[in-house]
């Protein structure tokens, strides 16, 4: 199963714009709250240096893309409805729709750094974007508490292993739950009162890491930007989803040449109006490096989830599969993965019958406990 990132935040923050910019899937975007009701889900790509550059031979990716030596590795992202304060009391669309995020490995909260919309997503002036972050954390805790409440009658009076299943379905493993229970000193028999269940939910909510995408940075004041940086660095990245979306669309229609996430673009064929709009974006890129959108995704995958890209091959000399396709596949694995973990990703039988493995870059055998590194090219030898 590939990685899934969930996009959350208040209405009108630009979640769907952020989602579209990353996936190029048309999602409904309007300046009004609650535009998105049903979740959007699609593929986005994280960038990695493609090792074909070292080899000097062209690669033939099957499960990913390679543009100018950059490998684009697919992951999934999902964009859901907006969340408002007191959603747990039924405000806005409530909390139930967050259940679409159960399978998310991590969350990205999109906030309106410009402060030009209130917590309900209505157009306003001088709103404090930091408030968005505070209320969302609280609602996420209530969401998790709600999941526990809905299952409580089934698990009440049993030993803790009874709630492992509830949270395994949220990609939270049993070891985490056990650590939390020990940390907050709860009984291992599920006889907790409501207050204890809420304390537990608060701890569980911390296991879903949240990265903050400070969106609409193109129209945010310098005061807002420095305040947000001061309060939330290093888990905040500033971005402009409208600019990233505009660049990708312009590239798709041949107006410019632009590689997603890069710090520049080249105009090919633009009319006056397009020139003007592109000049504004070029200025933003000059001042900020990139639009920041792709950086959010990559920080989530590389730094929050600590994933590395590994390339399995069958021919360790040509870095190819049996048919000669160079570096056809790439897998994202959590750091500290071993060749056996890679084998399991390729095929369960592969891991079961694992014999040994070769590091193709160094052309040497490696032990089955070897800790894989980002960019490794590995041949698995299996019985
Ligand atoms: N200036 C600026 N406006 C943006 C940016 N991203 C989105 N917007 C605008 O913000 C408004 C809301 O965008 P959406 O993407 O629909 O917001 P949402 O968070 O999905 O909203 P809901 O689905 O209603 O929760 C639209 O008018 C967008 O054009 C940005 O980076 N900069
Ligand atoms: Mg939306």
Image (spheres, rainbow, N blue to C red):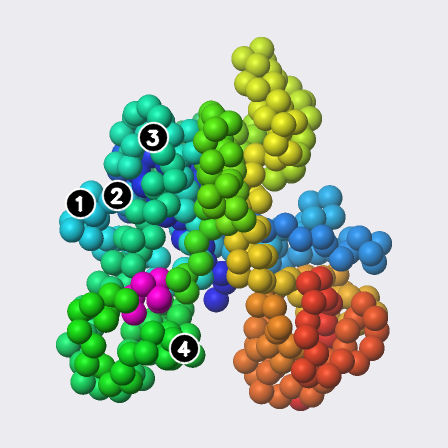
- How far is mark 4 from mark 1, CA to CA? 33 Å
Between 194 and 270, the one nearer to me in the picture:
194
Task: Nearest to the eye among marks 1 and 3: give it.
Answer: 3
The image's mark for residue 84 is 2
- How far is mark 1 from mark 3, CA to CA? 20 Å
* Picture coordinates of residue 10, whole percent (x, y): 32, 41
Q: Are marks 2 and 4 in contact (CB under 8 Å)?
A: no
Q: Are marks 2 and 3 in contact (CB under 8 Å)?
A: no
> Which label's residue is closer to the chain start, 4 or 3?
3
Vertical order, 111 against 264 (above or below): below
> Which label's residue is closer to the chain start, 4 or 1?
1
Q: Which residue is mark 3?
A: 127
Q: Are marks 4 and 3 in contact (CB under 8 Å)?
A: no
* Picture coordinates of residue 316, whole percent (x, y): 79, 72
Vertical order, 302 against 292 (above or below): below
How crowded pointer 2 is (Cα within 10 Å; few <14, some 14-19, many 20+) is rated as many
Q: Which residues are magenta?
A: 200-205
Vertical order, 234 against 205 (above or below): above
- How far is mark 2 from mark 4, CA to CA? 31 Å
Between 156 and 2, the one nearer to me in the picture:
156
Q: Are marks 1 and 3 in contact (CB under 8 Å)?
A: no
| Identity of the residue drawn at 50% across and 63% down | 2
* Residue positioned most to the top: 272
| Identity of the residue drawn at 18% across and 85% down | 157
Q: Which residue is mark 1?
A: 91
Task: Left or right? Give the position of 162 relative to 110.
Answer: left
Q: Which residue is mark 4?
A: 179
Task: Left or right? Give the position of 109 relative to 325.
Answer: left
Between 182 and 190, the one nearer to me in the picture:
182
């Amino acid at each position: 199963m590939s990685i899934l990132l969930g996009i959350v935040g208040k209405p009108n923050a630009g979640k769907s714009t952020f989602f579209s910019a990353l996936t190029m899937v048309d999602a409904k975007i309007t300046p009004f709250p609650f535009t998105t009701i049903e979740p959007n889900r699609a593929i986005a790509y994280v960038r990695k240096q493609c090792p074909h550059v070292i080899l000097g031979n062209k690669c033939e990716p099957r499960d990913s893309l390679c543009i100018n030596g950059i490998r684009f590795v697919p992951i999934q992202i999902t964009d859901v409805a907006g969340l408002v304060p007191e959603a747990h009391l039924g405000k806005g669309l409530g909390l139930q729709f967050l259940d679409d995020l159960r399978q998310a490995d991590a969350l990205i909260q999109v906030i309106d750094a410009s402060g030009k919309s209130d917590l309900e997503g209505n157009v306003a002036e001088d709103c404090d974007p930091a408030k968005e972050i505070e209320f969302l954390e609280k609602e996420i805790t209530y969401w998790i508490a709600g999941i526990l409440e809905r299952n409580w009658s089934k698990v009440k009076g049993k030993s803790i292993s009874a709630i492992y299943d509830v949270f395994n379905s949220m990609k939270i493993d049993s070891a985490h739950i056990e650590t939390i229970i020990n940390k907050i000193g709860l009984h291992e028999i599920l006889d907790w009162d409501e207050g204890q269940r809420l304390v537990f939910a608060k701890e569980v909510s911390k296991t879903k890491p949240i990265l903050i995408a400070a969106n609409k940075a193109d129209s945010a004041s310098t005061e807002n930007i420095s305040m947000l940086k001061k309060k939330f660095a290093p888990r905040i990245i500033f971005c402009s989803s409208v600019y990233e979306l505009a660049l990708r669309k312009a590239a798709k229609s041949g107006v410019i040449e632009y590689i997603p996430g890069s710090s520049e673009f080249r105009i090919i064929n633009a009319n006056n109006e397009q020139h003007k709009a592109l000049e504004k974006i070029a200025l933003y890129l000059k001042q900020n490096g990139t639009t920041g959108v792709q950086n959010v995704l990559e920080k989530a995958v590389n730094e929050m989830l600590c994933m590395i890209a590994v390339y399995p091959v069958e021919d360790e000399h040509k870095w190819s599969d049996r048919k000669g396709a160079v570096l056809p596949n790439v897998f994202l694995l959590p750091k500290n993965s071993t060749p056996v973990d890679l084998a399991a990703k390729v095929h369960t039988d592969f891991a079961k019958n694992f014999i040994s493995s070769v590091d193709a870059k160094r052309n040497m055998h490696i032990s089955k406990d070897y800790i894989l590194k980002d960019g490794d090219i590995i041949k698995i030898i299996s019985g």
